[in-house]
Amino acid sequence: MSVPLSQMWAVASYVLKQRLRGNTRYPLVLMLEPLFRCNLACAGCGKIQYPAQILKKHLTVEQCLAAVEECGAPIVSIPGGEPLMYPDIGRLVKELVARKTYVYLCTNALLLKEKLDAGLFAPSTFLSFSVHMDGLREEHDEAVCRDGVYDEAVDAIREALRRGFRVTTNTTLFDGANPLRMREFFDAMMDLGVEGMMVSPGYSYAKAPDREHFLRRQRAHELFSTILERPKRRWKFNQSPLFLQFLMGKQDFECTPWGNPTYNMFGWQRPCYLLQEGYAKTFRELMTTTKWESYGHRSGNEKCRDCMVHCGYEPTAVNHTFASWRGFRDTVVATVSGRF
Amino acid sequence: MTEETLEGWAPEIGHGVALEAVIERAFDYRGNVTVVKTDGAELEGYLFNRDRDVPAPFVQMFDRAGAGPIDIRYSEIRTIRFTGKDTAAGTSYAAWLRAKEAKKPASGA
């Protein structure tokens, strides 16, 4: 695992504190969506299909900071839309870093070089650019429905690394992914020098243009087992090794839908980052009034049946690490040995 | 794959159509709608939320200019018309696939 020790410690101490307090439901990562506007229209994305007045709107920095404060999670992930299109992204990140919050800025990197040149960001342990990369050139450009995006993203990653920024990648896998090409892709990202990679199967968004290529559970287990069975020592993943074991079918986890709560211009999204079943006005209202038992693989909810996405299962993996000696041992063994 | 869209639907409540069901469809719709109130007033915008589990159920909207959120009680709504373009009924992926196919050199020539 490639997460810096300080970040590991921040998360570990936060989780232990919650457990000592007897909190069974607590957030790990706030998914903060300041806007829905994007400069791509990816086939598998169901996040950006809104009327013009909604796409033109965005949260204020003050609204964002209030949500971060209200939520209290040690990590804030800023997806969207494309967060580099958010006019106050520089100020927002600066404020979050000043609060010692770990920020993952999830970007397609098309605007990254321009924003770095403009001096919008300063390198920090608390800031990581999490660049969307769905595979090598052919696969990535197809996933984002535009030629040339892979090359632009690679150039931007190189530039960010040259300037001393933390850079990770986030990859969504769909049915039809070629395991050998994925292994080559991991090599290519390591050659670039990124700090670590995040992988997850996609979710079949009801509003996504392409809903035919999402992975069912068994197929996902087969695919991730083939890709990760003999991982190279040089591959670094910026996520829990237990989550990767879950993707391979070696761990039987249930979803933790409150683990990555989502805030955007509509409010606190019920129940998770992927499903939009309504909005709460406050984080407390979200946590106390959402019918959590109606969600997750074992709930019987059809929308959750095949979902294995990291926003629901990575929090489970992290909790598992601290819930028992066995969980802790499994995590340490996987981290030290590099085997999943 | 062509999907059915509710774009243009103007249901009359009470003719086998319940207001609650129409509100659910409007909540799921990714386009602007026009809420017709019981006093005859109309509000066009994006209906992004509804809460049925409170003593006075309500919907929330941003109007066409993006102002809001505006809360409207279920009891104030006569019907909802699906007047705006359904942004989720687009064919961007299909168009991309067609463009990719067109770029490929003809085989078997």
Image (spheres, coloured by chain):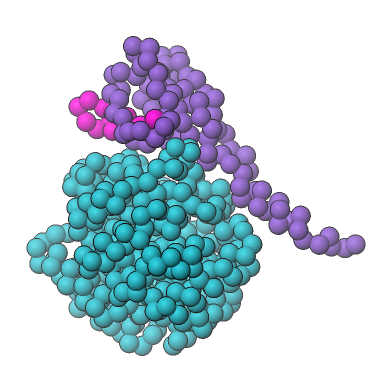
In the current view of this chain or complex, which residue is farthest to the top? B39
Q: Position of residue A100 (x, y in %)?
A: 22, 68
Q: Position of residue A182 (x, y in %)?
A: 55, 74
Residue A252 visible to an observer of this rendering: no
Q: Using the image as rendered, state which of residue A340 and residue A120 is in the foreground.
A: A120
Q: Using the image as rendered, state which of residue A272 and residue A322 is in the foreground.
A: A272
A207 displayed left or right of A18: right
Q: How many marks?
A: 0
Screen quadrant of the C terminus of chain A: bottom left
Chain the render paints cyan: A
Chain the render paints purple: B
Q: Is residue A258 above or below residue B22?
A: below
Q: Position of residue B81 (x, y in %)?
A: 47, 22
Screen quadrant of the N terminus of chain A: bottom left
Q: Using the image as rendered, state which of residue A163 and residue A128 is in the foreground.
A: A163
Residue A34 visible to an observer of this rendering: yes
The residue shown at (36%, 67%) is: A121
The residue shown at (28%, 33%) is: B51
In the current view of this chain or complex, which residue is farthest to the left? A21
In the current view of this chain or complex, which residue is farthest to the right? B109
Quarter-wise, where is residue A244 in the image?
bottom left
Question: Which region is colored magenta?
Answer: B51-63
Magenta span includes A171: no
The residue shown at (50%, 20%) is: B10
The residue shown at (24%, 41%) is: A281
A74 displayed left or right of B38: left
Q: Is residue A241 above or below residue A69?
A: below
In the current view of this chain or complex, which residue is farthest to the front? A118
